[in-house]
Image (spheres, grey):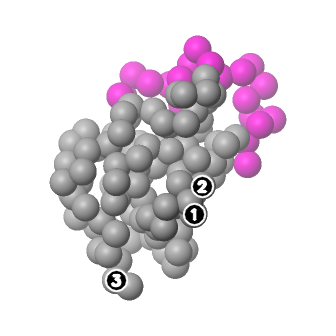
Amino acid sequence: MGELDGIDPSVPPSGDGCLECDSAGGWWVHLRRCAQCGHIGCCDSSPEQHASAHAAATGHPVVQSFEPGESWFWNYATETAFEGPELVSPHHRPVDQTVPGPGSRVPPDWQAHIH
């Protein structure tokens, strides 16, 4: 399996935040975008780790950072980082979204909940 397998540059992201956290009223630290289907999930530092759970459940191993100023890719199957193709816009979460975010749902003791 090559690094570009499982990447579809034409698929837009599923939204501005973690799909599952938004549905459940949760929060995240950083966001990751599935390079195959566009699913936006939260990173492994986040309480729920939805990006890696999505990769495990779907067999979509490659994500790209969905953070402003970051364009790196990560392959969960091989545990390697690499540079990949440009995906369709938008390339990151809204720049005014807080980290962790979204601000209205982040508990005051958020650092006690991260991995």
Q: Which residue is mark 2?
A: 53
Residue 21 picture location, percent across and down: 57, 32
**Up-down relation of residue 26 to residue 38 (above or below):** above
Alpha carbon distance from label 1 to label 2: 5 Å
Q: Where, by quadrant of the figure, is residue 5 drawn?
A: bottom left
Residue at the farthest front position? 58
Residue 106 percent coordinates (x, y): 65, 23
* Mark 3 or mark 2, earlier in chain: 3
Residue 98 lies within the magenta run: yes
59 or 66, which is in the foreground? 59
Q: Which residue in the structure is indicated by mark 3?
A: 2
Question: What residue is shown at x 50% (from left), y 44% (from top)?
Answer: 41
Label 1 with label 2: CB-CB less than 8 Å:
yes
Whether residue 79 can be seen here: yes
Q: Calculate the distance from the C-alpha at mark 3 to the C-alpha at mark 2.
A: 22 Å
Residue 86 sits inside the magenta stretch: no
Stretch of the chain drawn in magenta: 94-115
The residue that appears at 72% across and 21% down in the rendered structure is 107
What amino acid type should be assigned to the residue bearing mark 2?
Answer: Ala
